Image (cartoon, rainbow, N blue to C red):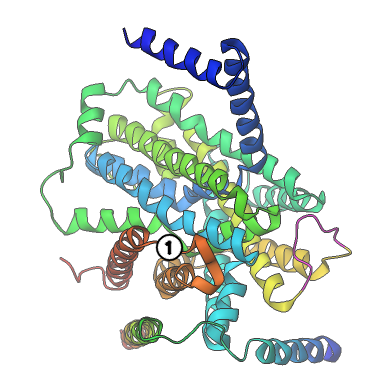
Amino acid sequence: MQEQIKAKVLAGGARRSGIGLIPSLYYHYRRIVKWLAIFLAISGPGIIVMVADNDAGGITTYAVTGARFGYGLIWFLILLGPVAYYIQEMTVRLGAVTKRGHAEAIFESFGIFWGWFSLFDLILINWLTLVTEFIGMTAALSIFHIPPFITVIVVSVVMSIMVLQGRYWTWEKIALLFCGVNLIYIPCAFIVHPSVSGVMRGALIPGFPGGFNNDIFFFLMANIGTTIAPWMIFFQQSAVVDKGMDEKDIPFGKVDTFIGAMFTVLLAAFVIIVTGTVLKGVPIESADQASRALIGVHKYLGTFLAIGLFDAGFLGAICISLASSWAFGEIFGWAHSLNNKIKEATWFYGSYFIAVITAGIVVLIPGAPLVLITLFVQVIAVTLLPAALIFLILLLNDGELMGEYKNNRFQNTISVMIVLGIIILSTLYAVSALFPNIFK
Amino acid sequence: MRGFFKYHFNKIREINQKYAKPRAKMTKGVGLALLMLRIYLIILIGILIFKFITVLKG
């Protein structure tokens, strides 16, 4: 009956418009194909930033969460998907409308005090995070007996080649390829034969395994800390600008960001499923430790997890180092596009290489305080994250700047609630990292 | 080396001049948000300094 009504409506519509049913359907088909073609051309920054969000630190957090609480906190990660989407979607609008990166937007709208504060904080946090990505990559490849110095050299060379080929488009497609490698966690989850009912329960029914206590609170905060990072805001806005996205591209940018947010949650859930199935109750502290433990369980499992950890660190590294160089370029007025040749944008590429090489060298220094650096990243990040988020909301409410794309009341209510929640929880996370016994 | 520093000092001066006047209107809401942010950062830096002193003493 429903089909008959649909056919009548379609035929009626076609008659009224003076065209037949088949041409009408063909027209719709062409429209969808055209939309997909435009989407494929415009998509990229959202998917890359979201998948790169699951960096080496993120994978470690998910692996430890799974080993500690099994599937019990998957629901919480699912909730974090829309949170990440809401924040990053604002950067798409801001970048597409203003054609400026976040650092430049802060300088221009709030003056030099907040501008320099944000820029220096961003450069410091990004460099420290870059060090943690190198730690993750060297640890992952050490499972395959690859010495850290080889990893650092090869990664630095590949990262350099990626930016030096002279086109943003090519860089983006290579980065998307590495995003695809992250899907390796999906077969891992099937290999371990998880309890489907257990996973569904963990994903759909909110709860706190063992009750709400300080331990679980710390893990919730850690998962939030890995979901929203300051570099993501700066990176996506600059990427939108470098890609040349316009106001008319905003809907595509939103879909791109939404797909990325779904991916990041899905991949995080799969990591939790793997460690939650095989390593539940095993006291692990890092993803590479989990990989080593999993090698004994299944021939490919630990290997896949190690490849995933390396890929996560690599994706994080390429995005974070670019976020810094873009910010520098915007403020200092250097040419700062990946479409520029090295001769045209010497300072832009120079700052990129300096960040990559120095971060790599730190990891190779014998006895370098790597644990302290990892801890320091968590603490310093909360000095910039609230500022970046507050500036984002203020900029999105500037009618003169944003015009019809400014936040409406609903968007403001949601984003203010999210930002307040993130600020409170990330601050508590930093405080608990500084004073481990404070919530015990 | 001297030229390098001179170039960058001039550049920073240029940036400071370029962005000397913030474009955003200082409405009550914006002023309050920035004030809260300042207070938050002062408290956070205070905690960091306290931790640093505690580590040094320990």
Instruction: Decide: is A189 above or below A156.
Output: above
Q: Position of residue A327 (x, y in %)?
A: 64, 69
Q: Which residue corresponds to the image point at 43% horizontal and 50% vertical from the top-left?
A: A85
Q: Start and end of the magenta stretch?
A: A334-342
Q: Quadrant of residue A435?
A: bottom left
Instruction: Decide: is A400 above or below B18.
Output: above
Q: Horizontal placement of B11 versus A75: left or right?
A: right
Q: Residue furthest left?
A: A211
Q: Which residue is mark 1?
A: A407
Q: Which residue corresponds to the image point at 43% horizontal and 63% vertical from the top-left?
A: A407
Q: Quadrant of residue A364?
A: bottom right
Q: Chain of mark 1?
A: A
Q: Position of residue A417 (x, y in %)?
A: 29, 63
Q: Horizontal placement of A128 versus A413: left or right?
A: right
Q: Quadrant of residue A296?
A: top left
Give B45 or A84, whichever is nearer the viewer: A84
Q: Which residue corresponds to the image point at 43% horizontal and 45% vertical from the top-left?
A: A59
Give A345 or A39, whichever is nearer the viewer: A39
Quadrant location of the C terminus of chain A? bottom left
Give A432 or B21, whichever is nearer the viewer: B21
Q: Which residue corresponds to the image point at 61% horizontal and 58% vertical from the top-left?
A: A96
Q: Is residue A195 visible?
A: no
